[in-house]
Image (cartoon, grey):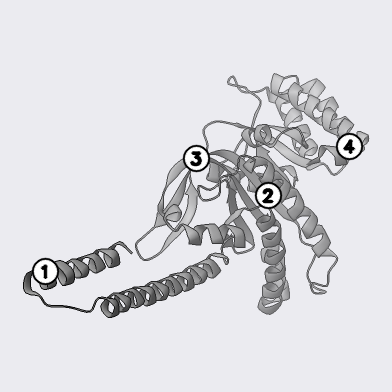
Amino acid sequence: LAAMLATCTAFTIVAMFVLFERYGIATALATPLIGMFVTWAMITAYRQLVEERAKRHFSRTLQQYTSPALAKRMAEDPDTVTRAETREVTCLFSDLKGFTSISERIGAEATQKVLNIYLERMTEVLDAREALINKFLGDGIFAFFNPAINPQADHAQRACLAALEAMAALEQLKHEPLGKDCHPLHMRIGLASGLAVVGNCGSERKFDYTCIGDTVNLASRLEGTNKTFGTGVLINARCKELAGPGLLCRHIGRILVVGRAAYEETHELVGRTDQIGSVQLEQIHCFEEAVRCFIAGNFTRAKAGFEQCLQHNATDAASQLYLGLCDAYAQVGPPDTWNGTVEMARK
């Protein structure tokens, strides 16, 4: 617009004040000015049409990786994708238990069908909570909350609710005909809140809008730790703190995951507080008291507590694990550097 106005002004000055005043040459003004305006309007309309088409295409492409609403924001301001910054996020890793053996049994075609249905349901849950789904890792999912392009003050709560809703969606999926040879699916989820670098990562040919850092690694390790404790969703202390009082957790203990030097206060995400009965709440308190005794080095009281937990739930793998540790430490004694840590073994 500025260039067109400058051109029109220059033409008018030359035509009226230079050619006419100085040389007496009369020049028509209307037709050239109208022509310039029409040309500018056509060019502007064409550019807007092309840009809008490009934005729509970009948005449709982004929707394959994240929610439609988030994709629209990224398409409207592509520069947000190129910026990298350190910010607090909540990372989510999920994985299907024993899916490799299931896929070997049911074959490639049935595996693809089951996996596509499963990932579609999980995507619906994560999109509803505005997670940024970073990638599918076979039957696993890596997503995170509170990216720079979509700030979320309640990112930890969103992640916890998404985890619970994903578990509920999987339970519903189990009742659908997924193939007679496909055993019921079980999922494990790890959540961790903390600082991470969020932004583009990759080469000039291919890049990924992702987050990297210790928080990402911790979420991945917590997902795998579920296998040891027989739990479904494990979260770190920061995630529990940020999620707020509306969610009930069971303190699993001081867990030293593989690859870290310091232990992590780890919690099992049980559910919403308004959906937990008094019996289950009492069992949680019993377990947490036994864990406190274990951390304090009182293995006799801890053992009695875990035995009581197993009387209520004989299949509780976490109580079984701690009971074995109590017996071992009662015989040989804890190490001199005892701080109640349970170290995860390398696979």
Residue on which the image places disc 3: 87
Task: Work out whether residue 148 or residue 33 is closer to the camera in this orientation and state it.
Answer: 33
How far across and how far down the image is residue 338, in percent?
Answer: 62, 22
Asked whether residue 23 appears in the rendered view, the answer is yes
Residue on which the image places disc 1: 21
85 to 57, vertically: above or below: above
Residue on which the image places disc 2: 189
Calculate the distance from the C-alpha at mark 2 to the C-alpha at mark 4: 21 Å
Calculate the distance from the C-alpha at mark 3 to the C-alpha at mark 2: 22 Å
State the SS at label 1. Answer: helix
Q: Earlier in the sequence, mark 1 or mark 4?
A: 1
Task: Work out whether residue 284 or residue 303 is closer to the camera in this orientation and state it.
Answer: 284
Q: Nearer the viewer, mark 3 or mark 1?
A: 1
State the SS at label 3. Answer: strand
Residue on which the image places disc 4: 280
Calculate the distance from the C-alpha at mark 4 to the C-alpha at mark 3: 36 Å
Residue type pointed to by label 2: Ile
